[in-house]
Amino acid sequence: MGKKRKVRVVECADEGPTAETVRKNVKSAVAVLIERHAESAGIVGLDPACGQAALEIAAVYVATTAGLWAKTARYGERMPGGTTADWSDAMVAANRRYRAWLDMALQDRRAGTASVRDVVLDAAVDGLGLRQIADRRGMDQRTVEKVLRESLEAYAVMAGWMRRAISRAA
């Protein structure tokens, strides 16, 4: 047998998450802006229709890119996803709206070097906060907020969920 080792047991109290973990766990920019809208009686922030736009953008993005990611299954089993033939009528309609928005969002470079699409996907798909997007894209947080608001309002208007874009009307 080998040499016996002395083991030192140290008790530690669970004090919850570290400050670093708390900093990383921020609310998505979309969630923050929708909360601001509710708290300010609709004066600032995002209308809930814009939240619906963000959810639809994320759903279509995930559905259209599903075939690009590795999947695991038992041998002989078929994995769902990856082809539009399996989509519901609602997802096909959502994809049409997404494609129309995507053409505009890829060409719009108000966000500096990043396209509006990049900023919206950071918020809607990756769930990043305003500061995280601003840092990632080299932008000011106010610019990120403006780009998100205007783009999601445009999507919601195009989808028929809002009458007109609020931020452009003001």
Image (cartoon, rainbow, N blue to C red):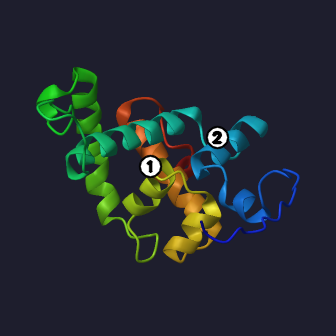
> Residue at 20% of width from left, 27% of height from top?
87
> Residue at 69% of width from left, 46% of height from top?
44
In the rendered image of this protein, does residue 133 appear above or below residue 65?
A: below
> Residue at 45% of width from left, 37% of height from top?
55
Name the kind of residue labelled 1 in the image: Val
Q: Position of residue 34 (x, y in %)?
A: 64, 40
Q: Position of residue 99 (x, y in %)?
A: 24, 46
Q: Residue 94: in sight, yes or no?
A: yes
Give the residue number, with chain letter if any, for mark 1: 125
In this view, the residue in front, 170 or 118, is: 118
In this view, the residue in front, 122 or 96, is: 122
Give the residue number, with chain letter if any, for mark 2: 34
In the rendered image of this protein, does residue 30 appear above or below residue 158?
A: below
Mark 2 / mark 1, whichever is N-terminal: 2
- Quarter holding the N terminus is bottom right
Q: Quadrant of residue 11?
A: bottom right
